[in-house]
Image (tube, coloured by chain):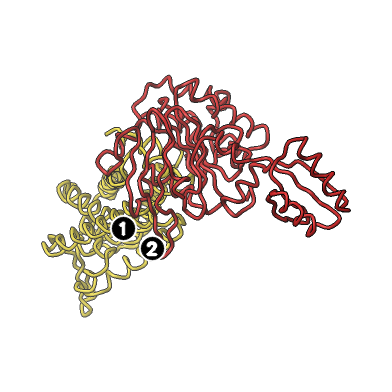
Chain colours: A yellow, B red
Amino acid sequence: MKLLKLEFFKCRRRKIALVCAAVLAAELLWFAIDLPRQDAEDLAQGWMLLFYNLALIDAIFLPISVAVIASRNCELEHKGAALKLLETMVTPGRLYITKLTWGALVLAALLSVRSAAFAAMGAAAHFSGDIPWGKFALFTVISWAVSMMVYALQQGLSLRFANQAVALVCGIFGSFVGVMSMLFPDWLVRCVPWGYYGLLSLARMDWDPDTRFTQFFWRWPEPLDVVLLLLFGALFFIVGRTLFVRKEV
Amino acid sequence: MMEAQKEVMSVSNVIETHNLCKRYGDALRVSHLNLTVPEGSVYGFLGPNGAGKSTTLKMLLGLVRPTEGAIRILGRPTDAASRLSVLRQVGSLIESPSYYGHLTGEENLRIVQTLRGVPEKHIREALQIVRLDGQRGKRVAHYSLGMKQRLGLAAALLGYPKLLILDEPTNGLDPAGIQEMRELIESLPERFGMTVVVSSHLLSEIDQMADTVGIIREGELMFQDTLETLHGRSRHHLALRTSNNAVARELLARQSISCEEEDGFLILPILSDELTAQLTRYLSENRLGVVRLEERQKSLEDIFLELTGKAASL
C-alpha cells in the first residue's frame, strides 16, 4: 500500500489526469460526430449501436492511450536513473507489480468514467429502452481486462527501453492493428492482442447486402476468447517482469 | 597480489568480499576481489576509468549480480533474502544522482524517507547537511548538476546509515563544490559514526579524504591498506649524473653501491651526507665530473602509475 501511494505521489505533475481527459474527450467526440450520421433504423437499436461503436472506438484509441499512460509512469524511472536508488530499498519484482497495480487503478477509473459518460450520452440521445447498466458494467470490465493485457505489454516495453519511442510506436501500431482487425476473421483476430477490444464486443453487426439493412445483435464473449485474453496477459506480465527483474541497473 | 589483498588489521570490518568476480561475456570485469573496509574509516576506492569500481560498488548494493564470490556487509551476508534488510543501514550514490526531475528536492527525499521508514524530520536535516534547505521547494529538473549531486548525497544520508557508498561523488562539481563535498565526506565518520566508501579516479582526491585505500586495475585489487602504508612506499633516493655515467657505474659497483640508470641519471639509494661527500670526492679523483646530484622522492602519483599502469588522473 505504501508503495502504491508512492507511485501516485511520483506521478504528481505528470499530467496523467490530462491524458485521461484527452482520451475521454476524443472518444466522446468521435461518437458525437458519428451519431448524427446514423439512419433511423440504426438509431432504433441505439444501445446496441453504442456498444458496437464503443468497441470500435476502444480499438482505435485505447492501445495508444494505454501506451502513453504506461510510458508516463515508467519514463520517470529512466529520466533520473531512479532505479539505482529505488532498487536498494525495494525489490524490482515488487516495484513491477506496484506499477502494474497503479496502471490497473488508473485504467479502472478512466474506463468507469468513460462508461458513465457514454451512458449519459445514450440517455441524452433518447435511445429506446432503459440504460443497460449491467451491460455497461460488463463492457467496462471487458475494456479494462483487454486494456490491462495491453498495459502489461506496454509496461514491459517502457521499463525495458529507456527510449520511450519503442513503447509508443508499439502503441500506435496497436491502434492501427486493433481497428483493422475488426475486418479480420475471428481466428486471426485471436492472434492479435489489440484485436480483443473488438473480439470481446457485446454487440455485433450483421449487414445484409441484398436488403442493405444493418442488424445489430447482442452476444456474450466466447469463453475461449476470455481464456486467450488471460493467457496473453499472463504471458506479457511474466516476460515483462522477468526481463525487468533480471536487468542490472 | 598476496600483499595487496592482505586484510587490513581492524577491530571489525563493515564490508568484506571474498573472491568477488563479475564476468560480462568473455571479459572478467572484476576479478577475485577481497575487499575489507574497516569500521569508521573513509575507504578510498581508487582506479582508472573502466577499472571495475562502479561494477564492484553495484555488486555491494545488489544492483549487479556477482558471477562468483561472497559479500558481507555489516557482518551479514547480502543474499537475495537479506539484501534489503542489510541495505536499510546503507546509503548510496552510484555514478550519477538518482532523482525525479518533475518533483521538488523535498518531494524526492520524501520518497526515500517513506521507503526507508525513517522520521520525517530527517528530510530537513539531510537538506541542511548538504546545504540545500533553501532550494527544497524547487523542482530538481531546474537544479544545477552540483545541486543534484548534493541532493543525491542527502538521499544517501537520510536515516543516518552506518555505511555510505559513494561512487565518484565529486563528478560534475566545480572546485568549490569539490572542496565542500570532500570536507563533508571527511567529517561523516566523526559526526555521525558512519563508514564511508568513496570511489574516484583522482589520486589527489582520495589522498585528501581517505584513511584506507584500495587500488583496482582491470578488475584486480592491486593494493589495499592504510593511506599511511601507501605513503610509506614513496621512498627517497639520490639521482646522480656524471660526465660519464658508464664509468661512474663501474666505480660505484667497486664501492658496493648499487644503482640503476634511468633517463640519464644513476639512481642510488639514499646516502648519509658524509658518504655522499666521499662519493663525489671519489668520482672527481677518478676524473669524473658530477653534473647533477639530486635527492628525489617517489610521489604517490608514481606509485599509482606503477600499480595501475595509468596516469594518476585518467
The residue at 57%/25% (across/down) is B131
Asked whether, in this view, residue A36 is left or right of residue B235, the answer is: left
- Vertical placement of B259 versus A17: above or below? below
Q: Secondary structure at mark 1?
A: helix
The residue at 75%/55% (across/down) is B249
In this view of the protein, can residue A124 be seen by the observer?
no
Figure quadrant of residue B194: top left
For label 1, the residue is A153
In this view of the protein, can residue A171 be seen by the observer?
yes
**Amino acid type of disc 1?**
Leu
Same subunit, tags 1 and 2: yes
Q: Please state the horizontal and vertical placement of residue B27, each as a whole percent of the image.
A: 43, 62
Asked whether, in this view, residue B126 is left or right of residue A146, the answer is: right
For label 2, the residue is A170
Is mark 1 in CB contact (under 8 Å) with mark 2?
A: yes
- Vertical placement of A51 versus B214: above or below? below
